[in-house]
Image: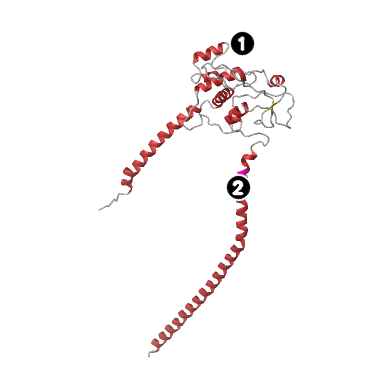
Amino acid sequence: FCPRVLSSCVGSLRLGESNMALRRALSVGARTLGQNGTRAMSTVASTAEEKAPLGISLAAGAAAAGFVFAATQEKASCNDDALQPPHYPWSHKGVFNAFDASAIRRGHQVYQQVCASCHGMRRVAYRTLVGVCYTEAEVKEMLSEMEFTDGPNDEGEMFQRPGKLTDYMLSPYANEEAARAANGGAVPPDLSLMVKARPRAEDYIFALLNGYTEPPTGVSIREGLHYNPYFPGGAIAMAKPLNEGVVEYDDGTEASETQMAKDVVCYLAWAAEPEHDERKKMGIKWLTALSVAIAGAAYFKRFKWNLLKNRKIEFF
């Protein structure tokens, strides 16, 4: 062979040997890496197996704590020394139900003739009664018999005037101290938002009004208090307010204790939320409008926009 050809052959052989050595080194490295990776994976798996019981224990403990919290949440918010009122099927509680205007009118009568001697409703204006349970003429006639303090006048003095539709219901006491002095140290609460201020709302007030009874054996009530199992502690300063026939309804409804309690609770529920009916009507209107809008959008998406979205444009 020519020396040049011989040297090129030798170079090729050396290059082939180098490639083979490189392949062997790579294969050895791959096997080593695989063994190390297997060992690492086994180490991670063993560590996970070791930590798994701890993780399961923590998860089980958290779940148990959450269950106990959820189970005791209602109990923690109630009084152990008072009965929980039952649930009553109020006619205005449904999604599409409104207040009974006749019940509101009768309840206002009960409030005026029974409750107003001790409790005020200073957040309720007389104008809100118009169109709900009274006509404007009836409310104005009612206000003409009342006197409200107004002023000062040109001489800087307060004066008395007949009531107006914009006036708010009067409180029976001039201030809190007068209320406390007239009721043995207890201040009768304002009833404007009483339904919203008590747990179980209407159910609690109805049960309280009908829950007066004699104290059980072993329970002593001090003088001036009355036993009611639905009141926290069982001893309430308010005497039993409702008795058979204490109110004579204008519409001839029999004024039983339960009927009066139901009517005055409906009135208090309306007073706490006079926009109740309007809010529900507005919600129905919005849901109807949104349903129509969603149906139109779905139709446009399916039969109009879908054709434009999937069309193919070719340029020649």
| 69 drawn magenta | yes
SS at mark 2 in the image: helix
| 199 drawn magenta | no
Q: Majority secondary structure of the magenta segment?
A: helix
- Residue furthest to the top: 155
Residue that appears at 61% across and 10% down: 160
Where residue 33 appears, as percent x and y from the top left, is 53, 72
Residue hosting label 1: 160
Count residues near mark 1 (Cα–Cα under 10 Å), then give few for <14, some for 14-19, many for 20+.
Answer: few
Q: Nearer the viewer, residue 312 or 272?
A: 272
Q: Is residue 11 left or right of residue 211?
A: left
In the picture, residue 77 is in which quadrant? top right
Residue hosting label 2: 67
Numbered label tally: 2
Figure quadrant of the N terminus: bottom left
Residue 96 tag number: none
Q: Is residue 312 left or right of residue 162?
A: left
Identified by mark 2, the residue type is: Phe
- State the extent of the magenta-drawn residues as a range: 65-71
Residue 291, placed above or below residue 35 = above
SS at mark 1 in the image: strand
